[in-house]
Image (cartoon, rainbow, N blue to C red):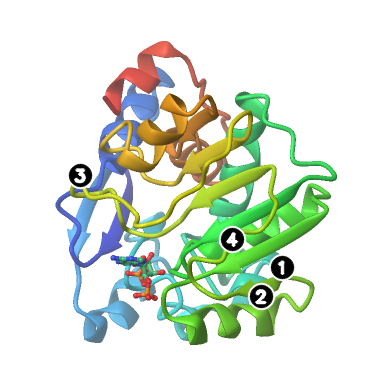
Amino acid sequence: MKKFFVIGNPISHSLSPELHNFWIKKNKINAVYDKIKLEESELKDFINKLRNEEIHGINVTVPFKNKVIKYLDKLSLEVETTGSVNTIYKSGNDIIGHNTDVAGFELGLRHSKINVLHKSILILGAGGVVPSIIYSLLSMGCKKIFLSNRTIEKAENIKKKFNEIEVLKWRKIPDFDIVINATSVGLKGDGLDLDFNTKNKVFYDVIYNPKETLFLKKAKENGNRIENGKLMFVYQANQSFSIWNNVIPKIDEEVLKILE
Ligand code: ATR
């Protein structure tokens, strides 16, 4: 039986096992997917279990997305650029690190028919997922990316990877088509202390639980289009699954319900 894991710390909140085990069953694959909380000191030994095929694939979440890199043999271009790994597998004798958050973000937007080509985008926050979102937006041909974070140094660090973005002071709102909340504000029912006063724009929140953060709720009341990060999450899982199992699992209403 193949064994897959998502590793992180904390990890109890992760819904990846529900999704993957659903697809494992649907596709009649002899496998199981579990979550496991690790300490940083345990990463090396855990990843090495892929070498003798004691385990077959690992998803990586906070706070290990960059900490695993030094234990891997080869990295995809997405990982080289973002410094972030969410999917690990063995190919030949090599342990490979890949980042399916990049494809997950793009496929989620395409599923929702949100077009970013030639659009100006404001990203709020500078946490672990932001480089993946920027990589994805640039590859889809957006016109301009503004990045704003409460702690400006973190945004400036991201600019070192992507020189074409423009860092703005916190609370400075430029003219934009799409704004993305990639901060953790909203997870606990809290709201960002920002005033947008826009309508007919797209407001996207990476958070999908709660389904509608205050950021999205206010935006909808003002007449903007809103979208949460649920599809990004589902598509990054879908892409990891297809790498490990050579099957592209179906995304339908039944799957989306798992995350409600
Ligand atoms: P991750 O775990 O994804 O790496 P993180 O590093 O915890 O995320 O980052 C969370 C993001 O939410 C950061 O951009 C953080 O801003 P700071 O870099 O200034 O800490 C942002 N954030 C958290 N609480 C916030 C608040 N009350 N107002 C504005 N931004 C906030």
Q: Quadrant for the C terminus, please.
A: top left
Lower position in the chain sequence, tag 2 or tag 4: 2
Q: Are marks 3 and 1 in contact (CB under 8 Å)?
A: no
User: Residue 38: x, y in percent?
Assistant: 20, 71
32 horizontally vs 69: left or right: left
Q: Nearer the viewer, mark 3 or mark 2?
A: 3
User: Residue 63: x, y in percent?
Assistant: 32, 72
The residue drawn where x is 39% and y is 58% is 58
Please tell me which residue lies in front, 191 or 230: 191
Ligand 1 closer than 8 Å to label 3 CB:
no
Q: Give the Cα separation between the discs numbered 3 and 2.
A: 35 Å
Residue 80 marker: 2
Secondary structure under tag 4 reads helix
Lower position in the chain sequence, tag 3 or tag 2: 2
116 to 223, vertically: above or below: below
Please tell me which residue lies in front, 73 or 183: 183
Residue 91 in sight here: no
Q: Give the Cα separation between the discs numbered 1 and 2.
A: 5 Å
Q: Are marks 2 and 4 in contact (CB under 8 Å)?
A: no
Q: Residues within 10 Å of mark 3 (few under 14, many from 20)?
A: few
Secondary structure under tag 2 reads helix
Amino acid type, label 3: Gly
Residue 132 marker: 4
Lower position in the chain sequence, tag 3 or tag 1: 1
The residue drawn where x is 67% and y is 85% is 160
Q: Nearer the viewer, mark 3 or mark 1?
A: 3
Amino acid type, label 2: Glu
242 horizontally vs 45: left or right: right
Reading the image, the residue beneath label 1 is 77
